[in-house]
Amino acid sequence: MNGFDWSFLAYDPERPLLFTQFYFWAFFALVLLIYSLIYQKKAARNAFLFLSSLFFYYKTSGLFLFILIFSTLADFFIGRAVYRAEGKKRKQWWVSLSVAVNLLVLGYFKYAYFVTDFLNSSLGLELQPVNHFALWANQAMGTDFVFDRILLPVGISFFTFQTISYSVDIYRGHIKPVKSILDFGFYVSFFPQLVAGPIVRASDFIPQLSQSYRLTREQFGLGLFWILNGLLKKVLLADYLALNFVDRVFANPSMYTGFENMMALFGYSIQVYADFSGYTDMAIGVALLLGFRLPTNFNSPYKASSVGEFWKRWHISLSKWLQDYLYIPMGGNRGGSIFSYGAMITILLVIGLLSGSLAGLILVAALLLGMGVGMALSPKFKLWIEHNVNLMLTMLLGGLWHGSSWNFVVWGGLNGLGLVVYKLWKKISPWSDKSRWYNRAWGILLTFTFITFTRAWFRNESFDQALFMIGHIGSSFQWDLIPEILVKTRAVFGVMLLGLIIHWLPSDFKQEYRARFSSAHWSVQLLLCFGSVVCAYQILSADLQPFIYFAF
């Protein structure tokens, strides 16, 4: 008689736990079942959810689980040291240690190849990244881990930012350190948002650890609504557009007309929003059913009528994190800092080195000299430069947070440049009165188009590929083929149009149908759930598409 097959508990890199898999919902149902027996005991509840989250991360990332555990242990004890330290300088030292440890872990696993390629290309070296952790494990335990390449742990950009916020919030006096390592581990690893956000601040989430479980009937309905809403966004919009149009054009843009390339860019804008916001919708819904509130991460970003407004609506948890933990400490709109000056000079020198010519370095030196003279002669110009340097640095580092390539740096820089230009333009714009519908409509169209075209660098693998796609749109638009393309690709374009129409619906209307679903009879909710799931899985590809932000 064969024994019970426990292989479903093992890590399978080909089958990570995804919200679109039946396996995840079976896992969540089991979590809910056990949770219903212990939810009134806070310590047991938090410990159980911490262990469940560790299992979830193991099923998603395998032995990278130990990176998560290391980050949890390090910041738990550093946080206590920050709180106990006497004097501002000692507290600052411990906070600096927390930031350094987290950024070193993040930098090693995410940016080793990026830094190595830069050093090799600029200095003529032949460095090769080595996974020292795998090498040490092989030497110590006789294992056979791959050590000649460094893989990226899923969600590392998210949980390292969360642990940094913990020590900084303790330093700022916003929270006190968590007494239990299990409670802190639960905060760091809470499985609904662990691998793709939203980024949860310690000051927002940790107070919830000591609160009693409370879930009204309407809140249960709202949690269910967000899960279904996210699932339909992911499957009916994001995956459908990716598989049937967007991925094909990006894979070989020269095989398609400029019009199709342009529509693929707009399709990708819709796809990345539906994919990422779909994940966070489901994360918010799952967390709500467990009695925890996660922050809003999106607020209809394609309703934005300016680049500045867009970044207040898109990936809100990251935008606010960068603002509060990077932009404002650098000086914000008040002035510069040693970090902002040093970073500005470093970036300009890197640009000069990458140019590969003496003329590039001379141009950078002349620019720095001109800026220095202008700042010395005009305090107003100095403040303007410092403000915009802080803004550009924030956007450049935000771009680099998304991925370890120059494409992401360029994407962040273009968005930063868009913010700088918008701040200048709004002072003289004849269309600044957004109370007039046509001014707002024009602003929305212009912003959506600008954001979409910057995503040529976000989606393509190389700078040249992004430039080729943009150039191909201008050189091979082929107006005469548009009617034929519209007919041939009508289903895809219909889905894109439907997605935008739903996105642009008034917020009051959306709140109304959310409230109607939340307060509906359980039989109506069950019927709508069944219909939504059947519809989603009828369209769902056999080859499940991972969430885009898993790669960040």
Image: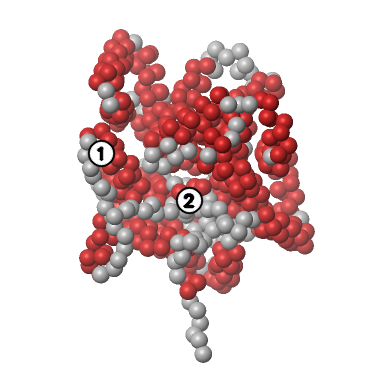
Q: Spatial distance from mark 2 to mark 1, Cα to Cα?
A: 28 Å
Res. 186 in view:
no
Q: What residue type is labelled 1?
A: Asn
Which residue shows up at 51% across the image and 31% down it? Answer: 469
Which residue shows up at 56% across the image and 24% down it? Answer: 474
Give the residue at the far bottom of this rendering.
Answer: 1
Residue 132: which disc? Answer: none
Q: Are the residues flagged by discs 2 and 1 in contact, CB closer than 8 Å?
A: no
Residue named by callout 2: 550
Which picture quadrant has residue 50? bottom left
Report crowding for label 2: few under 14, some 14 to 19, many 20 or more residues within 10 A (C-alpha): some
Percent coordinates x, y for residue 462 in the rendering = 42, 37
Q: Which amino acid does label 2 sit on?
A: Phe
Along the horizontal axis of the image, is 213 left or right of 108?
A: right
Percent coordinates x, y for residue 157 in the rendering = 41, 47
- Front one among 324 and 501: 501
Residue named by callout 1: 120
Which residue shows up at 71% across the image and 39% down it? Answer: 488
Report crowding for label 1: few under 14, some 14 to 19, many 20 or more residues within 10 A (C-alpha): few
- Front one among 533 and 298: 533
Q: Which of marks 2 and 1 is in front?
A: 1
Which residue shows up at 41% across the image and 63% down it? Answer: 62
Along the horizontal axis of the image, is 464 left or right of 350?
A: right
Which picture quadrant has residue 263? top right
Res. 386 in view:
yes
